[in-house]
Amino acid sequence: MEDAAPVVLTAANEREHARQRALLLAHQSALLDRDTAAARRTFDAFAAEILRHAAAEEAVVLPLYRELGGDAAHASPADQFEREHAKIRRWLDALRERLATLGQPPADGELLQILDAEASFKNLLAHHDLRENRILYPFLAEHADAPARARIVAALASAATPDR
Ligand SMILES: [Fe+2]
Ligand SMILES: [Fe+2]
């Protein structure tokens, strides 16, 4: 357990990111099917998942990172992760608004516009996920004790939507 700690924490985070990517893929598949109702529904499921994950990180993971000195030790202070979460929330709102005005079936132009916007968002998300996996979680794996690490894993798991 002790030796596996870095892998366990980063894997616990990455498992949730993989679920988020699967939900986003379901949404984009609905867009490609030109099924606007399904695209909205799957987007809401994706957004709910990612919001719960970010909230768990802000409630449990980032306070620990701060407490254990993550701010001083790295070029990625907790504030930066929080700012990225705020940016992700703004993107989710903007994309939801855009989906609300999408026709049924969507025209080529509006479909391409939303896919372009989602490509930018996916880029932002990929960078955020990468920094968490390279900096945040490895730092915690190194500095958090076993009970704290267990709290992190539990918080991430409980933020995930059950039964998928
Ligand atoms: Fe994360
Ligand atoms: Fe995050």
Image: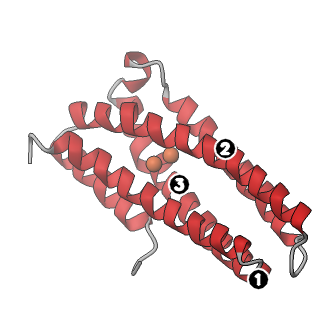
Identify which residue is drawn at 41% across, 78% down. Answer: 164
Mark 1: amino acid = Ala
Residue 97 figure quarter: bottom right
The answer to whether the residues at label 1 and label 3 have Cβ atoms under 8 Å apart is no
Mark 2: amino acid = Ala
Q: Which mark is residue 108?
A: none
Q: Position of residue 102 (x, y in %)?
A: 88, 71
In the image: residue 91, left or right of residue 5: right
Between marks 2 and 1, how big is the CA–CA gap? 27 Å
Determine whether the beta carbon of the residue marked 2 sits less than 8 angstroms from the nearest atom of ligand 2: no
Residue in the foreground of this view, choosing between 17 and 67: 17
Between marks 1 and 3, how big is the CA–CA gap? 27 Å
Q: Which residue is mark 2?
A: 86
Residue 74 figure quarter: top left
Q: Which residue is mark 3?
A: 55
In the image: residue 23, left or right of residue 87: left
Mark 3: amino acid = Ala
Q: Position of residue 84 (x, y in %)?
A: 61, 38
Identify which residue is drawn at 45% across, 64% down. Answer: 19
Which of the two marks, 1 or 3, is nearer to us in this view?
1
Q: Which mark is residue 37?
A: 1
Q: Residues within 10 Å of mark 3 (few under 14, many from 20)?
A: some
In the image: residue 98, left or right of residue 151: right
Q: Position of residue 75 (x, y in %)?
A: 47, 18
